[in-house]
Image: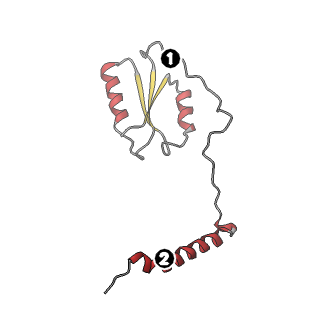
Amino acid sequence: MKRKPLLSSCLPAFTALILSCVVTISSACKSPEAMITVLNPAVMEKLAERVPLAPRLDTLEGKTIYLVDMNYEGILGTPVMGEMQRWFARNMPGVKTVLKLKSGSYISDDPALWKEIAEKGGDGVIMGVAG
């Protein structure tokens, strides 16, 4: 018995299946409900406004430094900022540290935290995303 190659025997059915998928997709795309909006990730011609860095502190002695966990891993935060706070307590006791967990996810803004830091006299911020 002579065998036919599998591809040649399945080719007509496979071709019909592909064509029916293409027809189904193209007809579905004509419906306004099936359309999606796509954003172009290309860089815009106009650059974002440049904001200069804050001036460097001459010393940390007597300053208040906020240690802000960016909440990368969820609501419990990470142990890294706590370890930094313990390091400051051991090695630079004249520096007051305030440990804060930013609300929301690491990509969301937290205006209440930034306001707190400004109003309570935060001299500097160390922000961390760590695991």
- Residue, x 42% and y 75% (percent of image)? 7
Query: Residue 44 in the image: x percent, y percent?
Result: 66, 39
Label placed on residue 46: none
For badge 2, the amino acid type reads Phe
For badge 1, the amino acid type reads Arg
Q: Is residue 16 above or below residue 80?
A: below
- Residue, x 55% and y 33% (percent of image)? 114
Secondary structure beneath disc 2? helix
Circle 2 crowding by C-alpha within 10 Å: few under 14, some 14–19, many from 20: few
Residue picked out by circle 2: 14
Q: Relative to the observer, which residue lies in front, 26 or 48?
A: 26
Residue 90 left/right relative to 65: left
The image quarter in which residue 36 lies = bottom right
Which residue occupies the extreme bottom position in the image?
1
Is there CB contact under 8 Å for labels 1 and 2?
A: no
- Residue, x 47% and y 12% (percent of image)? 58
Secondary structure beneath disc 1? loop
Residue 62 left/right relative to 92: right
Residue picked out by circle 1: 56
